[in-house]
Amino acid sequence: MITINTFEEEKKAENKISESRKQTNDLRIFNSSLSHEIKAPIRAIDGYARIFLEDYGAGIDENGVKLIENIRNICSDTLVLINKLLDYTKFAEMEPIKEPVDLKNLIQSVFNELVGSYSAGNSTDLRFKSSIPIILSDSFLIKQIITNIISNSLKFTRGKEAGIITVGYQYEENTPVFYIKDNGVGFDMKFSENLFGMFQRMHSVDDFEGSGLGLALVKKMIESLGGSVWITGEVGKGACIYFTIAQEDILN
């Protein structure tokens, strides 16, 4: 009787896993279809707006041109948002493949790639406050994490005459913690928990561009790697994002 019950429980567990995989696959197909169905008309609107400007732009006043350009900007922002939502779903489903990653070199490389597009009117320095260990991680996911964090730091230090992004590594209560800190606009700490929610923003879209999904993606990806993430900040003095990974994934 015990054997039969055990067999039935195992069968139920297998059926539950199979159903879960089917639902995940159905969600993936739905997201792909939804992406195509929404992106197509948005691209069409943007295309017609571009053609209108090319063919008739010379015959309308400055305000008219600005209105059409606003339409194109809204189309562009909407496409970015759709891609971010798809990324969120994709990263939630990914099974990390871990390999050695030189985190310091990765952070420096991402900074070098991004800094030119954010620092037109100011200079921004990247500083390492401590040695950064080589870690065991999924190279694709960790690069996406660093890209999102560095992008935020560059965006929110853009108004500073001299932006500073500081990277460090330390132990807190026997836990290895990485941090990326900036001297940007910062935020009120009473809103800190909201920052990792989807579509949560602390600043007006008129002041800073963005989808409100960046930190939600960071949280999802870090958790998929077995770590945790939190943020501190102060209005006018900057913000600092901390994240952990498993002790066994610290290689040196």
Image (tube, rainbow, N blue to C red):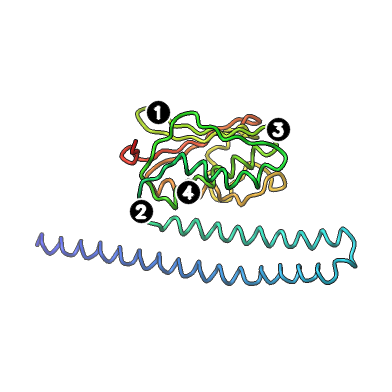
- Give the SS element for disc 2: loop
State how far apart marks 1 and 3 are (Cα).
Answer: 33 Å
Which badge, 3 or 4, is on the more N-terminal residue?
Answer: 4
Q: Quadrant of the N terminus?
A: bottom left
State how far apart marks 4 and 2 are (Cα).
Answer: 13 Å
Residue beneath the point at 90% across and 68% down:
59
**To which residue does mark 3 refer?**
161
Report whether residue 190 is seen.
no
Which badge, 2 or 1, is on the more N-terminal residue?
Answer: 2
Q: Residue 122: where, in percent of width, then height? A: 70, 37
Disc 1 residue crowd, few under 14, some 14–19, many 20+, Cα 10 Å? few
Q: Quadrant of the C terminus?
A: top left
Question: Which three-letter amino acid code belongs to the residue tagged 1?
Answer: Glu
**To which residue does mark 1 refer?**
172
Q: CB atoms at circles 4 and 2 under 8 Å apart? A: no
Disc 4 residue crowd, few under 14, some 14–19, many 20+, Cα 10 Å? some
**To which residue does mark 4 refer?**
143
**To which residue does mark 2 refer?**
97
